[in-house]
Image (tube, helix red, strand yellow):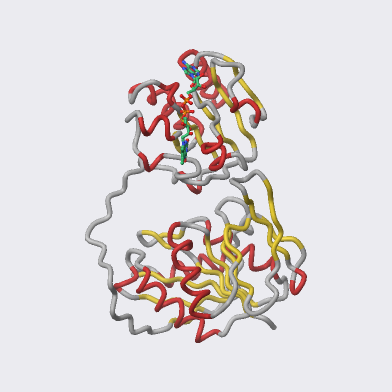
Amino acid sequence: MSTILAFAEARDGELRNVSFETISAAKQIDGDAQVVGVVLSDQNTEALADEMIHHGADRALVVEHADLKEYTSDAFTQAAMAVINEEEPDGIVMGHTSAGKDLSPRLASKLDNGLVSDITGIEGSGDDAEFVRPIYSGKAFEKKKLADGLTFVTIRPNNIAPLEKDTNRSGEVSSLDVDIKDIRTVIQEVIRKTSEGVDLSEANIIVAGGRGVKSEEGFQPLYQLADELGAAVGASRGACDAGYCDYSLQIGQTGKVVTPDLYIAVGISGAIQHLAGMSNSKVIVAINKDPEANIFNVADYGIVGDLFDVIPKLTEEIKALKV
Ligand SMILES: Cc1cc2nc3c(=O)[nH]c(=O)nc-3n(C[C@H](O)[C@H](O)[C@H](O)COP(=O)(O)OP(=O)(O)OC[C@H]3O[C@@H](n4cnc5c(N)ncnc54)[C@H](O)[C@@H]3O)c2cc1C
């Protein structure tokens, strides 16, 4: 039986959703494989390992170490390599997140193995598995196959649905002691710039504002709509450059790449660099006063109007639906 490692991603003692998506991807790659959930963290690893099992992992392996509190290339590479050497897997799946983007090529290089990064889908399985990934800023898709070695992929968050949670599932949890040393970078402080609440890269719904929002205060109606929808707020670079919001909210070629179920673009013209970060969203709604705005070319639904009229009305309607 083959073994596939599904790497979890923990933050402050909790798992990010992409952790569960890696298990689902591993099962799609090979339905007969033994999927091992791997948790690298400084705390709470036993409970996190159980969560991985509840989401479909057959068993779990944890490395708990004080140096795994915040992501550093050196510590996580050493921990991950120790796990890989221990398990000698046939496949590895991790999230295409900030940490995954840094860690996966390091591991691939150490293993002298190929890597298919940022995949959004899997076709076929076993030796026939092909990995679908967007190219040219999401304008086209390519299918890739690994011709040799381990099946090593990173998955774009929010594209491969996690398996249903089943708290009755059980599996073995083992731990591995790793001697982590020679860390060349030290995290002094983590300053979280994103607002409280829903994480932009994992959000199912995003309300994003552009330069049309006109000011920092202009973002307030967007936050109110986002609150009603349980959504995260994002932005175009135009809005960030104008100082209306923090760069941590920027979506696009030089910002975050997101694929929520619903993306509401408010006062955003739809420049190619913005589309690169959101055009693979499942449903796109555009609100713009210019009927010729390019964003309408990618939108499933469009509202031509002044956002300061449309957004409060939309928020009221959604509130009313909830009563
Ligand atoms: C190398 C490079 C990388 C880049 N990376 C990114 C990136 O990652 N992300 C990104 O977003 N951009 C990026 N850009 C910038 C990009 O080219 C655009 O300049 C930017 O996306 C424009 O932002 P915007 O749509 O908010 O502003 P604008 O293009 O100014 O559009 C504002 C829109 O608001 C509408 N509007 C105005 N008032 C209202 C109102 N009251 N109600 C409704 N609609 C209204 C207007 O009709 C207009 O369509 C990059 C550019 C370069 C060169």
User: Where residue 78 sits: x, y (%)?
Assistant: 40, 78
User: Where residue 273 sits: x, y (%)?
Assistant: 52, 38
Left or right of residue 205: residue 133: right
User: Where residue 269 sits: x, y (%)?
Assistant: 53, 26
Give the mark count.
0
Please determine whether, in this image, residue 158 is positioned above or below residue 155. above
Please determine whether, in this image, residue 288 is positioned above or below residue 172. above
Left or right of residue 219: residue 52: right
Left or right of residue 98: residue 196: left
User: Where residue 123 sits: x, y (%)?
Assistant: 75, 61
User: In the rendered image, which quarter is residue 26 located in?
Assistant: bottom right
Please determine whether, in this image, residue 232 is positioned above or below residue 317. below
The residue drawn where x is 67% and y is 81% is 2
The residue drawn where x is 71% and y is 59% is 143
Instruction: In this rendered view, identify the residue nearer to me: 217 or 277.
Output: 277
The residue drawn where x is 45% and y is 15% is 308
The residue drawn where x is 34% and y is 37% is 246
Left or right of residue 307: residue 152: right
Instruction: In this rendered view, identify the residue nearer to me: 20 or 134.
Output: 134
User: In the rendered image, which quarter is residue 43 located in?
Assistant: bottom left
Instruction: In this rendered view, identify the residue nearer to me: 211 or 167.
Output: 211
Q: Residue furthest left?
A: 188
Q: Which image quarter holds the C terminus?
A: top right
Q: Which image quarter holds the N terminus?
A: bottom right
